[in-house]
Amino acid sequence: MCGRYTLTAPAEVLSEVFEIEEPVNWTPRYNIAPTQEAAVLGLNHQGGRSIGGMKWGLVPSWAKDPSIGNRMINARAETVAEKPAYRSSFKKRRCLLLADGFYEWKKAGSVKQPYYLSLQDHRPFAIAGIWSRWRREEQDDLLTCSLITTSPNSVAAEVHDRMPAILQAEDFNAWLDPANDDTQALLAMLGPYSGEDLQAFAVSTLVNSPKNDTPQLIERLA
DNA sequence: CCAGACGTTGTT
DNA sequence: GTCTGG
DNA sequence: CCAGACGTTGTT
DNA sequence: GTCTGG
């Protein structure tokens, strides 16, 4: 995990579910891949929630070349607080990646079958993430993010041995608060998803190509 | 001291 | 930036 | 995660 | 085979 996900809910639904005051700009996407734009929820300067776009693939502020971001797409919950490339973002720059499903590839011998995992009611959810700002001369800052992975719950374990860390709504504010320095409490939020409503089913290998982005990608295989 | 890495997944 | 390895 | 490229010189 | 790009 986790190299593809979806955010298909319209902007109005995102505003409502995540309690965003300002208008949200988001076009539904069925195949969000690393290096592409993620919808990221953070706190604005007034402390309210806001959603903005960030490139998926974290570029630490000290990077000489932003291509390092191609490899920094996932951070393990077990080590995110310690790894040199991630720890400063974990300490001061936590965020939520908004999604309503993710893909995992299950290996059967040499065959890789993609599965789509989502909540039974298709509600959007929030994946724990971290972000970074890479300053460029004569250009806007490059904002990037990584998502955090953890061990799978019983449903996800049927497909793969990792899953994204999905946060409970009551943890959103504590996760996003940059002043929160309770590492133990933060890490405790990153367990496998504990709800009973995660579902998984096989989907077409059309999802394999990042170029494909249609509703067909999330249709259950007959 | 300076140089070089800084990551995960999956596969063997 | 900060740590590890040479 | 998977797909796709993997190179230089010289010319326009 | 391995790295980069999406």
Image (tube, coloured by chain):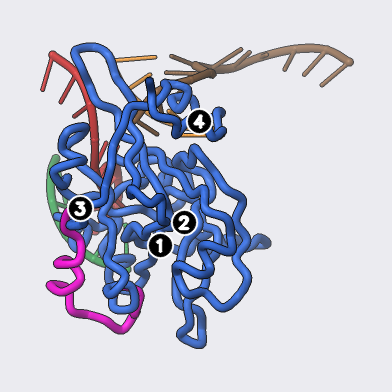
Chain colours: A blue, B red, C green, D brown, E orange
Front position among marks 4 and 2: 4
**Chain containing the residue with disc 4:** A
Mark closer to the chain start, 2 or 1: 1
Residue A135 appears at what percent x and percent y? 53, 63
Instruction: Read off the magenta span.
Output: A175-193
Residue A15 appears at what percent x and percent y? 53, 68
Mark closer to the chain start, 4 or 2: 2
Front position among marks 4 and 3: 3
Q: Which mark is residue A131?
A: 1
Q: Which residue is the extreme one toward the bottom?
A: A46
Mark closer to the chain start, 4 or 1: 1
Q: Which residue is mark 2?
A: A144
| Three-letter code, disc 2 | Thr
Instruction: Pick the quarter of the image with the C terminus of chain A.
Output: top left
**Chain containing the residue with disc 3:** A
Residue A110: in magenta span: no
Verify CB contact (< 8 Å) between mark 2 and mark 1: yes
Q: Residue at point 29% right, 19% down? A: A112
Instruction: Pick the quarter of the image with the N terminus of chain A.
Output: top left
Q: Which residue is mark 3?
A: A196
Q: Which residue is mark 4?
A: A210
Residue at mark 4 to residue at mark 3: CA–CA distance = 30 Å
Front position among marks 3 and 1: 3
Task: Report crowding for label 1: few under 14, some 14 to 19, many 20 or more residues within 10 A (C-alpha).
Answer: many
| Local secondary structure at mark 3 | loop
